[in-house]
Image: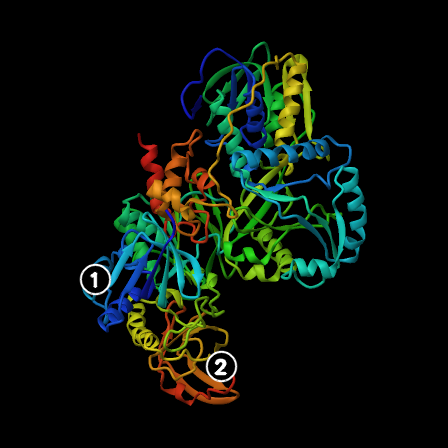
Amino acid sequence: MSVTTRGALPGGAYDVTVIGAGVVGSAIARELARLPLRIALLDASDDVGDGTSKANTAILHTGFDAVPGSLESRLVRDGSRRLAAYAAENGIPVEPLGALLVAWDGEQHAALPSLAAKAGRNGYHDARIVTAEEVRSREPHLGPGVLGALDVPGESVICPWTTTLAYATQAVRAGVDLHLNCRVDAVTSGDPHLLATGRGPLRTRHLVNAAGLYADEIDRLLGHDDFTVTPRRGQLVVFDALARDLVRHILLPVPGALGKGVLVAPTVHGKVMLGPTAEDLDDKTATGSTAEGLALLREKGRRILPALLDEEVTAVYAGLRAATGSEDYAIRAHPAQRYVTVGGIRSTGLTASMAIAAHVVDLLAEGGLPTSGAEDLEPLRMPNLGEAFPRPYRDAELIASDPEYGRIVCHCERVTRGEIRDALASTVPPGSLDGLRRRTRARAGRCQGFHCGAEVRALLESKARP
Amino acid sequence: MNTTDRRVDVLVIGAGPAGLALAARAARAGAGRVEVLERDQQPGGVPRHCHHGGFGSPPRPWLHGPEYARRAVTAALDAGVALRTGVTATGWAGPLTLETTSPAGLERITARAVVLATGARERPRSARLVPGTRPAGVLTTGELQRSLHAYAQPAGRRAVLVGAEPVSRHAARALRRAGTQAVAMLTEHPRGTALPGVPLLTRTTVTALHGRGRLTGVAVRHQDGRAGVIACDTVVFTGDWIPDHELARRGGITLDPGTRGPCVDPAFRTTTPGVFAIGNALHGAEPAATAAAEGTAAAPAVLAHLTGTPWPTPGPRLLPESPLTWITPNHLPTPATRPLLLRATTPLPTPLLQAHQDGRPLWHHRFPTHVPPSRSLHLPPGWTRRIDGEGGPVILSVS
C-alpha cells in the first residue's frame, strides 16, 4: 500500500497501469485491486479527483435521459445501482431527493411526454408528468410561469469528492500504487509498454487511459486518433447553507435545442448549486469563471428560484467536461495492444463510474489480462461530509471518546480538529488546502477562511513538515 | 454521554467588544449567572487581531487591539461573568435554548435572556462574484490578520488591496510590517484613503483573478474603460461587511433587509421575546468602541426583561431610501435615546438628511462633511419623539 508524490517510480513492470485518478480512473483501479495483480494509478495532479471530477454537478443519475441503446445509457443505469449500494456500504453521502424537470414555456411543456417515453426506453419507468399546481406545492419558492414538470423520483445528489476518494482509498489499501504529480509525457508501446513520466520511466503490461480531458492526447501517443476532446466549460455558483430551505428537489432544465441548460440542486453538503454553463473551448486549463458566465447563471437562477439570488454565494468555480462531439462514451479496447481508452466521459461519469470500471476490466481480459481470483475488498467507513447525516460536532459519544471532535475549527461548515487530523493521517492524504477541503469541508463555507483560514493552513502545514 | 441541560440568566453568544461589555455591565448590575460563549479558543473578538492603535472611546492612538481586547476580557471576568471559550452555539432547541458543542461535549443551555453578539465578517472573493481562476493568495483582511499575527504565516511578496477605507489601510500596514509590498489599493468609489507610497486607483474594479496554484495577477478596469493587469501574488479583499447572522436566522429572528442583521428596536430587542442583538452582528463593521457602547447600552434593557418588563410590539419601521442602505435601530416602538447609525452605498458630500412619516417631515439636518460609504452617520435621536407610533414607516432620504 503506497501513495507517492515525488521521486523516482518503482522498477519492474506493473500488470496494469491506469492513467488518470479521477472518479473513473480511481473506480477502475479499485475494480482491478480485487485481482492478484500489480497495479499503478497515475495522476498529473497532486491529488485524486482534482480535474473534471471535483467540479461535477454531483448528481447520482437514473440515466432516464440518456440516448436509448447507447453504451452510456447501459453504464449509467448499471452504475447508478452499483454506486448507490457502494455509497450506502462505505459512508458516501447520498440524498434521494428526486428531480423535477420544470417546463417554463410551451415548447418545454410539449417536450415532457417524449422525455417520459425516452425514460421508458432507458428502462426507467417511474417518470411521470405533473401539473403546475403540484410542482408549485412541492417547490413553493419557484419563480412564476411554471407550466408543469416531469417528475423523476429516482434522481439523487451525492458527494463527488468522497466517491473518488473512497475508490482511491480502497484501491491503495488493497495494494495499488498511487503515484501523484506524475504526468505521462510519452508512451513507447510494447510488451511491456514504457511510459515516460515527469517522475521517470514506468513499465506496464496493460494500460488504461482514463486521462479525462487529455484522453485524446494519450490515445495519440498509442497511435490512435479516434476522437478529439473539446473542453466544455461549466461554471457553477454555490449558495450558502442558509439557502438550502429554498429548494427540495433537483430542479433540472428541460433539454432544448441549446443543450441541457442550467440546473438548481441542493448539494449533499447542505448548500444550493446553480449551473452549469456550457461553453466549448480550446484550452484544457481554462477553469476560470467569467463575468459573462456568472451573469448568465444569475439571470437563469433568478427565473427558476428568485429568492436564491438574495442569498450569499460561498463558491464560484468552473469545471471542464470532456466533450467529444459524439453523444456517447468513447470507450475503446485495443486488445492486441493490451490497451483500453476510456474517453468522452461526461457529467454522467460519476454515476457510471463503477459500471465503467467493470466494463473496462472485461475489455482488459480480452487483451489477455488474467482476471481470475477476484476477491471482495474490505469495506470502508468514509468520513461523512453529508449535511443530512450525523457529523462529529453533533455526536456526544464521539466527543466523549475524543474531545478533538468537539473542537470546531471551521465554524461555517462545523469541521472539527479531529476530522482535520484524521484527513491528514488518512490513506490518501491531502496535498493542499483544496484537497483538505474536499476531505473535510474545511474552508468551504460562507466566510472562505475569514475566521479559520489561518488555523486550517497551520494544521495542514504542521503535517506537511515532517 | 448525553447532552447536558443547563439554565443561566443571561447567555451572551460572542466574546467580542459588544458581548463582553454587555456581560460585564449586566453582571455588575446583579443579573445573576451571566455566561458568555466564545467559539474561538481566545476571547476578545476581532480586536485581538488588529495590531494597530486607535482603540477605545475616545480613540487612543497608543491603545492597540490586543490590549483593548485583554482589558475588555478582564473587565468582564472582574464583574463575575462566566466566560467559556471553544464553545460553539450550533443551533436552537427552543425559543431561548441554545445547543452547543465544545470539547467537553454537547449542551442545551436555556437562558432568561439570550444576547446575540456574533459579530461580522468581510465578504470573500466568491461572494463578490469576482471571476477568474481560483489560486492561493486570495484573502480577506480577517484571514490576513490572523495568518500574520496569530500564526506568523508569510503573505507573499506583492499584494493588491481591494478597498480604500480604514480597514484596507490597516491591512496594507500589516502587510508592510510582514515585508510584503502593497503595490496598489483600489476602490470603485471616486475617492478613498490610501497609505502614503501605495498607489490608489479610484473608480476601479477587479474584473478577474489570474494564476494557477498561486495568484499571478489581478485584472482591473477603470470606469472610463481603461483596463490592465497588476502583477501580484496576493490580493486582500477588505471591507464589505456582513453580520454573522446564521444563528439569528436559524432561530427564526426577523432580519433587516438593509443591515442583514437582526431587526432591533432602540433597546436592542429582536422580534423574538427574550432575544437581544448587539454590536457588529447588527450592522457590519463599526469601531470596537461603538460595538462596546451598544453592549453597555443594551444591558439595562436585558435587566428590565429579567424583571418582567413586557416585550413591546414592533413600532414603525425605519426605511432608508437609496443611496442610503441601512439604519439601526430598525424600528421604533419607543423613541431612540442614543444616536442612530445610518450608512450609504455611495460617498455623500455634505449630505442633507431628511426623515418623513406618512408624508410629514419629522427632521432634517445637513452634515457639513464628506461621508464615505465606509463610515456611519450618527443621527441625533431627539427627533424620533415626533414619530407617530401608530403611523406608517419612517422614510430616511438624502438630497
Query: How far apart are the alpha carbons under marks 1 and 2?
Result: 42 Å
- In terms of image quadrants, where is residue A403? top left
Q: Earlier in the sequence, mark 1 or mark 2?
A: 1
Would you say residue A289 is visible in this rendering?
yes
Instruction: Provide the residue designation for mark 2.
Output: B395
| Chain hosting mark 2 | B
Task: Please say if A78 is above or below A35.
Answer: below
Circle 1 chain: B
Place of residue A387 in the rendered image (x, y in percent of width and height, measured from the top left): 50, 48
**Amino acid carrying mark 1 in the image:** Leu
- The kind of secondary structure element at disc 2 is strand
Depicted A210 relative to depicted A84: above or below: above
Q: Pointer 1: what residue?
A: B77
Q: Is residue A377 above or below residue B340?
A: above
User: Is residue A49 visible in the rendered structure shown here?
Assistant: no
> Residue at 47% of width from left, 61% of height from top?
B250
Image point (66%, 62%), residue name = A143
Report helix, strand or loop for mark 1. helix
Which residue is rendered at x = 68% and y = 61% of the image? A137
Task: Measuring from the top left, give residue A258's x and y in whole percent.
Answer: 72, 48
Q: Position of residue B372 (x, y in %)?
A: 39, 70
Amino acid found under the numbered disc labelled 2: Ile
Q: Taking B83 as reference, is A49 left or right? A: right
